[in-house]
Amino acid sequence: MAGNSFGTLFRLTTFGESHGTALGGVIDGCPAGLELDTGKIQYELDRRKPGQSAIVTQRKEPDEFRILSGVFEGKTTGVPIGFVIENTNQKSHDYSHIKDSYRPSHADYVYDRKYGFRDYRGGGRSSARETACRVVGGAIARQLLRDISIEAYVSSVGDIFLEKPYQELDLSGREDNPVRCPDSKVAARMEEYIKEIRKQGDTVGGTVTCVIRNVPIGLGEPVFDKLHADLGKAMLSINAVKGFEYGSGFCGAKMKGSAHNDLYNPDGSTKTNLSGGIQGGISNGMDIYFRVAFKPVATIMQSQPTIDRDGNTVEMQGKGRHDPCVVPRAVPIVEAMAALVLADHYLINRNAKL
């Protein structure tokens, strides 16, 4: 199976399955001498881990990580950083009913057709549990980026939208509620809606908005390795993501150029920022902001028709512990993937100037 690594100079490779012994990863390219705060890494994992509130999966995993290599006396040595996260609360019997059949909208069918074999326990490698490794990599990348701020938040759940632009929000409040929405009133509506959806045995999707501040001018390459293209790939690689837009996004398609152009100030900043902080694939020093759309979780606690390995139609109903809405736990994953992209482009840009 290919495609387990992400990045060029700052490169993360992950391994492990949802119900295997452990997950883990190797980070290659992290410069030597970076003072690493392991408490910040664990904090990010705690934001992603299951069982943290009543509106997420109740699988109980501490998600405590161990660094195996690449760090000595609290600083990176420049060699690959290896880490591991133990799986401690697997309930593989919850998936015995899908051993020979395929869950609708999951990767089960295509895995079987592509590889001729699959780990049906929680989806194996296709499970979103793999994203814990991305969070570790992103947390280390953030410490390399230092002054760059990366803040994501839930901006919609179903048809409940946070209408205010990010400039009018206090994003520090996004951790004050289990939905991770910075507006407490909207968050309360979202939370109640998710609880109602769970009672129905159903799931619901939503969006996560991310804002990146203090990005230096010059990150990104102007042809195939555009900064927004790599951000798009990073976000679309996250489980359940169906869409990515940055800056004016799809709304920009409705506008005239005279209204959409970001006019310059004398210092090179722009009066508006419909470009989303990126022009020609290169960061321009303004805020980078984008939105990521997540589909409803595919496993629902309702009976649905599907097919088995022999092509027979069978009935299936979800079992086990699953998120009724993925977006609250997706917030730190979005931030982590953004950090990995920026760290990679930071090193590429630095090397180009040597």
Image (tube, rainbow, N blue to C red):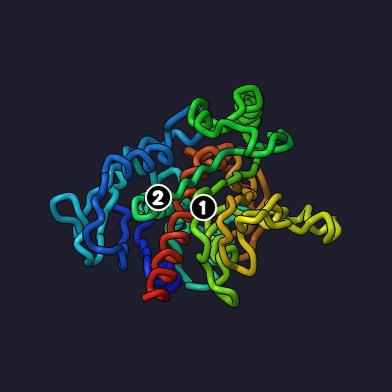
Q: Image point 52% across, 44% down: which residue?
A: 330
26 sits to left or right of 170: left
Can you tell which mark lies on residue 183? none
Q: Residue at x 53, y 49 (%)?
A: 212
Under mark 2, the amino acid is Val
- Residue 331 in the image: state x and y as whole percent: 51, 43
Quadrant of image for the C terminus: bottom left
- Of circles 2 and 1, the one toward us is 2
Q: Which residue is found at the position 48% from the left and 36% from the top? A: 57
- Could you say which is closer to the camera, residue 62 or residue 226? 226
Q: Residue furthest front?
A: 266
Image: 245 above or below 188:
below
Instruction: List x then y, in percent, for residue 169.
Output: 61, 32
Which is more toward the observer, 27 or 104?
Answer: 27
Left or right of 285? Residue 263 is right
Q: Secondary structure beneath disc 1?
A: helix
- Quadrant housing residue 25: bottom left
- Tell me if I can see residue 265 in this picture: yes
User: Observer-nearest residue: 92 or 332?
Assistant: 332
Instruction: Identify residue for label 1.
Output: 98
Q: Is residue 233 visible?
A: no
Q: Secondary structure at mark 2?
A: helix
How far is mark 2 from mark 1, CA to CA? Answer: 29 Å
Kindly identify which residue carries mark 2.
135
- Where is residue 129 shown, x and y percent of the image? 43, 50
The location of residue 91, given as percent across then percent down, is: 38, 42
Callout 2: few (<14), some (14-19), or many (20+) C-alpha neighbours within 10 Å?
Answer: many
The amino acid beneath tag 1 is Ile
